[in-house]
Amino acid sequence: MVGYAFMGAAHSQAWRTVNRVFDLPTRATMVAVCGRDAAKVAEAAGRLGWAEAVTDWRELVARDDIDVIDVCTPGDSHAEIAIAALEAGKHVLCEKPLANNVDEARAMVAAATKARALGVRSACGFNYRRVPAVTLMRNLIAEGRLGAIRHVRAVYLQDWITDPNFPLVWRLQKDKAGSGALGDIGAHIIDLTQFVTGQTITGVAGLTETFIKERPLPEASSGLSASAGATTGEVTVDDAAVFVARLSGGGLATYEATRFATGRKNGLKVEINGERGSLVFDLERLNELEFYDATLPTAEQGFNRILVTEGEHPYVSAWWPPGHIIGYEHSFTHEMRDFIEAITTGTDPTPSFEDALQVQLVLDAVERSGSADASWISVPAPLVES
Amino acid sequence: MVGYAFMGAAHSQAWRTVNRVFDLPTRATMVAVCGRDAAKVAEAAGRLGWAEAVTDWRELVARDDIDVIDVCTPGDSHAEIAIAALEAGKHVLCEKPLANNVDEARAMVAAATKARALGVRSACGFNYRRVPAVTLMRNLIAEGRLGAIRHVRAVYLQDWITDPNFPLVWRLQKDKAGSGALGDIGAHIIDLTQFVTGQTITGVAGLTETFIKERPLPEASSGLSASAGATTGEVTVDDAAVFVARLSGGGLATYEATRFATGRKNGLKVEINGERGSLVFDLERLNELEFYDATLPTAEQGFNRILVTEGEHPYVSAWWPPGHIIGYEHSFTHEMRDFIEAITTGTDPTPSFEDALQVQLVLDAVERSGSADASWISVPAPLVES
Amino acid sequence: MVGYAFMGAAHSQAWRTVNRVFDLPTRATMVAVCGRDAAKVAEAAGRLGWAEAVTDWRELVARDDIDVIDVCTPGDSHAEIAIAALEAGKHVLCEKPLANNVDEARAMVAAATKARALGVRSACGFNYRRVPAVTLMRNLIAEGRLGAIRHVRAVYLQDWITDPNFPLVWRLQKDKAGSGALGDIGAHIIDLTQFVTGQTITGVAGLTETFIKERPLPEASSGLSASAGATTGEVTVDDAAVFVARLSGGGLATYEATRFATGRKNGLKVEINGERGSLVFDLERLNELEFYDATLPTAEQGFNRILVTEGEHPYVSAWWPPGHIIGYEHSFTHEMRDFIEAITTGTDPTPSFEDALQVQLVLDAVERSGSADASWISVPAPLVES
Amino acid sequence: MVGYAFMGAAHSQAWRTVNRVFDLPTRATMVAVCGRDAAKVAEAAGRLGWAEAVTDWRELVARDDIDVIDVCTPGDSHAEIAIAALEAGKHVLCEKPLANNVDEARAMVAAATKARALGVRSACGFNYRRVPAVTLMRNLIAEGRLGAIRHVRAVYLQDWITDPNFPLVWRLQKDKAGSGALGDIGAHIIDLTQFVTGQTITGVAGLTETFIKERPLPEASSGLSASAGATTGEVTVDDAAVFVARLSGGGLATYEATRFATGRKNGLKVEINGERGSLVFDLERLNELEFYDATLPTAEQGFNRILVTEGEHPYVSAWWPPGHIIGYEHSFTHEMRDFIEAITTGTDPTPSFEDALQVQLVLDAVERSGSADASWISVPAPLVES
C-alpha cells in the first residue's frame, strides 16, 4: 500500500478484516506500506498491521513478494505509481478519483488495457458501490423494477471547511488534489449514479464556486506554493459545484458536491425516479434503502424503508444477524473481497480504469462548464485505442 | 371569486374559515362565484358557500357590493380579469403564477401600480409563504441565524402524470397553462426560496423535458387544439425542469420541478445552508421545520426537528394546542387573514404583483435556457416604469 | 352543542365544513350553542357560527327544531345531558371519555339502548378513529394482513403540565375531569387499539403517578374546592399512567398516557405486530402509516411509509390531491360525516356508547390496579341488561 | 476466549481491531480460543485470528501465558468458567447476561470481589454502553441536562422466531439460556437504562408469554432434552416479556423485550423524559441521538438529531471523519478498549459483576411477576457480604 493517511487507514482495516469475515480462496498478506517520512510510515505500519515500512514506492513495485499495489496517495501521484505497478505486473487497486485530469486517466487506461492482456488486473476504489444498499439499488434497477429512469438527483454534502480559518490543506490545492469538492466527493456521486442506473452522463451545464478564496497556511507549509513569509495562501480548487445533466437513457439529472452545507457531514443522498418506482439512499444511514414500488395497489404504495441487513442482501451474510448495522469502513472490506475474488478467479474487477476515466470525463466537463458561464458541455465516450 | 375548481375549493374553504379562527377587523362575505357553465357554477356556489353564482366575471367587476376579486382561473385569463378588476377599484387576489408570460405580468404590475396609488390593493397567491414553518424559516434567516447563504436546494416533485394514458388536461397545454411543471410548481419553489432568503435569482442554466409527448384527449375535448377526429394530442408544456442558479447574495442554488418523480405526491423540499446554520422544509410534513444551529457546542449540533405548532409560531395561536397539526388548506386561510388585514389597515399585502413578476422573469429565463441548450440566462430586475 | 371551549371549537369547525366537503343527504344546520356565561357563549356563537346562544342546555333539549345534541362539556356533566337528550328523542354525539366513571357510563348505555329502540342514535366522540390512516390500519387488520396480533404498544405523550407553575385547571381535578392523563388521553389509545385490532383488553396491571401534587390556583378559582385564601390546591388526578395488558386474541400490550413527556406535544403512537406484518401510526404525522408486509420477498421487506392522501384512502377523495395533507381537525369533520350519514340512513353510528363503556371499564381497571400496587385487574365484559 | 459463535466472532473482530485504532498502553495478543468440537474450533481459530485452538477451557485457565479470559459461551457455563478463571488470577470479561439465575450471579460476584482484592479485574459485556450515542446519553443526563427523570420507555424488539417452523435452538431452552427474550435482550435495556439514568429499578409488574409452545428440533438435536424419536420439543423460555417499573428516582418506566415484533430486527429503542429535556436512541440507527432541550426558546425547541460522529463524541476520534458512520461491532471494540485500559491502569472496568447482578435481580423479579399474574415484585439491592 502506498499512502497511510485517511484512505490508508480505511484500506488497512479492510485488508485486516476481509479474510476474517469472507471465505475467499486467497488470504491477503499485508507485506509493506510506503510513505515518504520514514518515522511516520514505520509508526503507521506497526499501528495499521503492515509487516514492513518503506519510503520509496518503486521498491514495492520492484519486489517479487508483492502481487498487489494499493494506491492511497493524493491524486497527483496516482498515474505514475499505478502505471509503473501495472507495467511491473502488479495488480493495482487505485483510490478515486482515478487521476487529477483526463490525460493522466487516459494514460492509466492504456496501461491497464495492456496489463489486462497479460492477466494483470486493475480497479478504481469507488467504495460506495459496495455498500450493500447501493448494490441492492443497482440490482433492483437492473431487474427492471424502476422501468425507464426519468430523474436522478444526487448530492454529496459536507461542511468541514465552512470555517474561514480552516487551513489550506492539500485537498484545497489544485496541483495536489486536481479539484475540490467536485473531484473529491462529486466523483463519488457521478460514479454511483452511473453504476446503479447502468447509464452514462452525456452532457452537463453547471457552476463551480470558491466561497473562501484565501486561507491560513498549515503550520508545516513547506509543500505549499506560497510566497516566502506568507501566512495565508490561495484556495485553488472549488468549494462547491452544482450541475444539471442528461443521462444516456433520456432522463434528467441534478448533481451537487459541496463542502459548505452546514450540518451535512457525509451527506451523500441519491434519489432515482423511474416509470415504475423510485429508490432513495442516504450515506449517513447507509444500512437503509427506500424503495417505492408503483406496481403495488395504490393504497399500499409508499417509500419502503428496507433495512439492508438481511442475509439475502449483498455482502451481508458474512456479517451479523439482521438489524445489526455495519459502518462506513465495511464498504472497503467488500471492495477488497471482490478485488481478491476477481484476481483469484482471473476476471476483471470493477469499476475498471475505463469506468473511472468516464467519471473523469464528466468531472472535466463540469469544470469546463463552470469556467465558461455554465455552458453546455458534452461528455465524450471514453474510447480507448485498441 | 372567479373559478371554482381545485383552487376555487381551497380558497372557499379559507374564506369560510378565516373569520371563525382569526380575530379580524372585517368579516369576509362570500358574495358570488363565477364560472362559464351556469349549472356547474350554481352547484359549486351552493356547495362551497357562495351566495350567488354568475357566468360572466365582468358582472362581478361591475358590482358595487363587491370589494375583492379572487382570481382562481387558469393562467391565460389572469391578466384580463385582474387588470379589469383593479381598474374598477376592486382589490385583487390572483392565483399563481401571476400570468402565462412576462408581458402579461408586466401589464398586471402596471395596473397594480396605478391602483395602489388609489388605495386599491393586489397580491399574488403564493400560499406556501403562509405555512407557519415557512414563515418561521424566513424569520430565522431575517434574524441572521444562518449568516451568509451558501446553498439553496429546492425541489417540487409530483408524479400525477407518469402514466402515459393520463389525458391531455388543460395543465398540459401551453395556451392555457403557460408552462408545465415549471410554471405550476416550479413557480412555488422560486417564490418560496426568494421569500425566505430575501434574495433574488440573478441567472439560470437549465434543462426542460417533455417525457410523454402525445397523450389521449380528455372526453370533452372541444376546447383542445386537436385535429378533427384525433384521439390524442400533443403535450405542449414541460413535464420537468431542472436548473442551477446564482443568488443575489453569492450563493449557488439548484431547482427541480417535475411531475415524473414516482412516489412524490406533493414533494416540495427546500434546504438552505448558511455560514451559521441550515434549514430544511418538506411540504408533505408541513408542520415541521428542521433547524441546524452551528453556533451550539459541536457535540450538541444536529438537525433539530421543530414541530411548528406552538402558540409562539406564526399563525398557530389561532388554531389548536401544540402537536395538533394543521393541513395544506390552512396556508390559504392564513393568506386570506393577511390579505384582509392589509386591506383593512390600508397597507399593501404580499407578495405583490412585482414580486410575482420577478418569479415570472425567472420562469422565463429557465424556459429560454431550456430551449437554448442550457445556456446561461441572466434574470433582469423587475423594473417598472413609474 | 353544549360547551364551546377546545372541543367546542373543533366540533364547530367540523359542523361548518362537513357539508361543504362531503356530499351528504342532509345538511347540518348550526342552530344553537349553550354555555353558562351568557356573554361568553354569545361571543362564541358569533365566532364559531351558531345561530343562537343559550345558557341552559335543558332549553336545547326541549326545542323542537333541534334534532342532535353535541355534548362538548367536561366529563362530569356528560351523563346528565346525554341521558336527558336521548330521553327527549335527540340523537346524541358525546365527547370522550363517555363519563367520569363506570356507573355513569352504564346509565348512559341503558339510556342509549332504550333510545335506539325508538330510532334515536348515539355515538361517542373518539375522533381519531376517523383519521384516514387509522381507518386504513383497521381495514388492513380486518383483511387479515397482519394475521394473529402478537403485540400492541401504544403511548399518548404530552408535556403541557411539566412546569410546576402550570395552574390547577379543571382537567387536573378529579371531580370535574374524572381522571387525568389516563381518562383524557389514555382513553384515546385504549379505544384506538381496540378499534383497529377488533379485540378487547381483558386485564391490566399498571401504575399511576402524580408528579406535581400541589399547583397554583388559576386566577378565577371560584369553582375550585380549595380552602379560602389558599393560593395553591391539590392535584387530584394522575399525571401519568402506565400499564401492561392482555388482549382477547392472546397478544400482549403496553400502554402509557402522560402529560410529562417533555417534547412530546400530541404524541399518540401505536405499533401493532402481527404474524404477517406490522403497522405504525404517529398522530404528529397523521397523514402517514407505516406498514411492514412480511409476505413480501425478504430482501424487499421494510416499513413502508404510506402517505395516506390518495383518493383510494378512507375519507380522502373529498379533500385535496395526493400529498396535500390534512390536519387534526379533519378527524372531526369525518366524524360528523359518518354521524350524519348514520342518522340519515337510520343506522347506528360508531363508536356506540357500549364501545365507550368498554373503554371506561378498562380505565377503571387501570385506576384500580394503580391504587393496589399494580395488581392484576380483569376487565369485565360490558354487558347491558336487555 | 471460550466460545466462538456469534459473540465469539464479534469479540474476535474487536480484539483484532482495538489496538489498530486506539492508542493503548498494552497490545492484546489473541492466544487461544476454546470450543468443544476440535475440528470446528480449529477452523474458527484460523478464521477469527486466534493462534491456538483448545477443547477444554480449563486448559486456558491453567496457562501462564494467558492474562485474560473472555467468556462467550451460553449462560449456563458462565459461572463455572468465570469463577475458575478469577480464582486462577485471570482477568475476566463475561458476556451478558452474567448468569442464568441470581444464585449463580451472586457466586460470581463473590468471586469477583475476592479477586478484585488481589488486583484481578472483571466486567460484564453489556456492549451497548459503549455505543457513542449511549455514552453521550449518559453524559448529558449526568450533567443534569434532563433534570429529574419522569419516564423511561425501553423496548428491544426482534422478530427472528415469528415463524413457527423456526427450530428449537439453544436460545429457546431454559436449561441452556436461562430465559428467552427477557434475559437475552431484555437484559440489555435494563442495563442500558439503569446506566444512562444512574438509577435502579426498584420494583416491577409484568407479563411473559410463549406464543409458540412447540417447535421442530434442530437436525443435530443430540443436546436437546427431548424424548427419543420426537421431532418437536417444548419451548421452555419466554418469547416476550412486558413490564412496568418504578425507578429509584421516582420515575415510571415501561419495558418490552420480544422476538415477535415483525419487522423489527434489532429494535432497541429507549426514550427518557426529564424535567428539562428528553433523549431518544434507536440501535438500528446507532450513530444518532435525539436530544430535546426544553431550556431553548419555545419556538426553537425540537428533537435534535445529533449525528454522533464528531471527534468530540465518546470514542469517535479514533475512527473516521464526521458523518462516516460506525456499526454494531464497534461497540465491542470500545468495550475491549476500556477493558484493556482498566487492566493496564489497575482500575475496575465497568459494568462490574455487581452491576450485572443488579440486572439479574430485575430479570428475576420480572420472571416471578410474570409467573404470578403480574403481581408487584420489589427488586432487592444487590448487597454482597464483605
Image (cartoon, coloured by chain):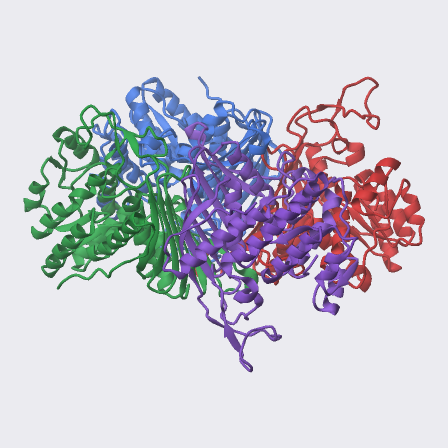
Chain colours: A purple, B green, C blue, D red
At x 33% / y 31%, what residue is drawn?
C317
User: x, y (%) of residue A378?
Assistant: 41, 50
Q: Position of residue B133 (x, y in %)?
A: 37, 52
Q: Split into 4 quadrants, where in the image is the N terminus of chain A?
A: bottom right
Which of these two is toward me, C281 or D376?
C281
Image check: A288 left or right of A364?
right
Q: Nearer the viewer, residue B382 or A190?
A: A190
Q: Quadrant of residue B77?
A: top left
Quarter of the figure with the C terminus of chain A: top right
The spot of residue D141 in percent (x, y) is 60, 58
Residue at horizontal 74 percent and vertical 35 percent from the top: D179
- List the single residue furthest toward the front: A386
In the image, is C260 to the left or to the right of D256?
left
Residue B312, picture quadrant: bottom left
Q: Residue furthest bottom?
A: A229
Please give left or right for residue D120 compared with residue C378 in the image. right
The structure residue drawn at horizontal position 50% and vertical position 44%, both measured from the top left corner, is A194
